[in-house]
Image (tube, grey):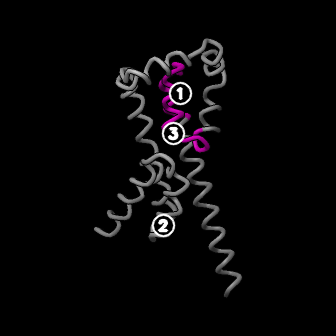
Amino acid sequence: MTEYLAKALATWLIAFFPLAEIYVAVPSAMAMGLDPLSAVAWSVFGNYVPVFVVYVAYSQILRIPRFGPWLERRASATVRDRLDRHGFWFVVLITPWIGVWIVALVVRLFGMDARRFFLSSFISIALYAIVIAAAISLGLEALGGASG
């Protein structure tokens, strides 16, 4: 049980940090010996926590002297309107490509509805994690079948 928890915590930490996120967490978890379901679950959990961290810490981020005003100047009405109309799909498609930390900051900056954002980011993270785990499992099965 201790070994499983250590692997789960390592997976969670890998998924939490920017740049690694689910693309590194899922394969790492499976390489450590976690089953695909556990690899996906812990990776999604670790990668989803920053959504709340950024969402809650946003007002503190705006207080950073050079960063806050710079961010606020980037908030345009045109982008805000587009995000209101297409934000759900934007988040689903783009989150794994540019990272949940940046997407959470951008979405918060442009004022996307919190419930829509939380749902779309969860769907995105979970979907991509499942695809990665399935691709790894299928690849390992193909390699195992070819050598045996």
The amino acid type found where label 3 is placed reads Val
Is residue 107 part of the magenta span, yes or no? yes
Q: What residue type is labelled 2?
A: Asp
- What secondary structure is found at the residue carrying circle 2? loop
**Mark 3 — residue?**
100
Question: In the image, which residues are magenta?
Answer: 95-120
Write the residue at 52% across / 52% down. 22
Q: Mark number for residue 35?
A: 2
> Quadrant of residue 138 in the image?
bottom right
* Spot occupied by residue 55 in the image (x, y as percentages of width and height): 42, 28
Label placed on residue 106: 1
Neighbourhood count class around disc 1 (C-alpha, 10 Å): few under 14, some 14–19, many 20 upward: some
Q: Residue at x 43, y 55 (%)?
A: 14
Q: Is mark 3 on a helix, strand or loop?
A: helix
Q: Foreground residue, 76 or 55? A: 76
Residue extending farthest to the right is 146
x then y, percent, for residue 123:
56, 40
Q: Does the magenta stretch include residue 112?
A: yes
**Quick one: label 2, few (<14), some, or many (20+) residues within 10 Å?**
few
Q: Which callout, 1 or 2, points at the residue further toward the start of the chain?
A: 2
